[in-house]
Structures are given as C-alpha cells and as structure tokens.
Image (cartoon, helix red, strand yellow):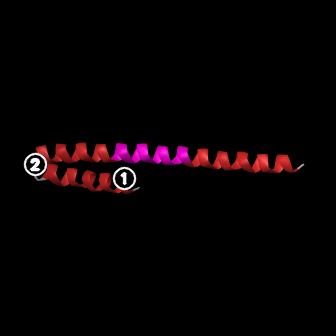
Amino acid sequence: MPFGIVGIVFAAQVNAKFDAGDFEGALKASKEAKKWMIWGLISSILIVLLYLIFIFALGGLAFMGNYWQF
C-alpha cells in the first residue's frame, strides 16, 4: 500500500504540472507514478503468494498432525 500511495501522489501532480505548462515535469511525474504503481503491484502479488504458501503449509502441517494421531 505505501508504494501505491506514493504513486497516487505523483499521479496527482501530473495534471497540475501539465496545466501550468510544465510538460517535462508532467512527463517526469507520470513516469515516477508508473514506476511506483508497478512496484506496488509487484509487492502486492508477492505478499499474496507468500501468504498463500504460508496458509497451505500450515494446513498441511495440521493435516499431518491429525493424520498421525489415528
């Protein structure tokens, strides 16, 4: 989430800079917003994958623990 917030801040700067006539600044802010949004997406996907691996690992351990009790 922090990466997405930074991306939104840069994206909000694009229109203001474009309207002020700072086309180079608007382009730079747009590229920064894209970079931060991509990092946010990658980190979110990684966190979800690690979470799922953790949940399945705990589920497998719980199943094995119950299996050996019988």
Quadrant for residue 38, please give it. top left
Residue sitting at 28 percent across and 47 percent down? 33
Q: Nearer the viewer, residue 5 or 49?
A: 49
Residue 44 part of the magenta segment: yes
User: Is 22 situated left or right of 36 in this image?
Assistant: left
Dot 1, how many residues are within 10 Å of its Cα: few (below 14), some (14-19), or many (20+)? some
Dot 2, how many residues are within 10 Å of its Cα: few (below 14), some (14-19), or many (20+)? some
Checking the image for residue 39, the label placed there is: none
Q: Give the mark nearest the N terminus, 1 or 2.
A: 1
Image location (x, y in percent) of residue 39: 36, 45
Checking the image for residue 22, the label placed there is: 2
Image location (x, y in percent) of residue 19: 14, 51
Residue sitting at 21 percent across and 51 percent down? 15
Outermost residue on the left side: it is: 21
> What's under tag 2, amino acid-wise?
Asp
Q: Secondary structure at mark 1?
A: helix
Image location (x, y in percent) of residue 43: 43, 46
Checking the image for residue 4, the label placed there is: 1
Residue sitting at 86 percent across and 51 percent down? 69
Extent of the magenta region: 37-50
- The quarter in which the N terminus is drawn is bottom left
Outermost residue on the right side: it is: 70
Q: Nearer the viewer, residue 4 or 64?
A: 64
Residues at marks 1 and 2 touching, judged by CB atoms closer than 8 Å? no
Image location (x, y in percent) of residue 3: 35, 52
> What's under tag 1, amino acid-wise?
Gly
Residue sitting at 31 percent across and 47 percent down? 36
Q: Nearer the viewer, residue 26 or 63?
A: 63
Q: Secondary structure at mark 2?
A: loop
The span from disc 1 to disc 2 (Cα, nearest Å) is 24 Å
User: Is 13 situated left or right of 40 in this image?
Assistant: left
Q: Nearer the viewer, mark 1 or mark 2?
A: 1
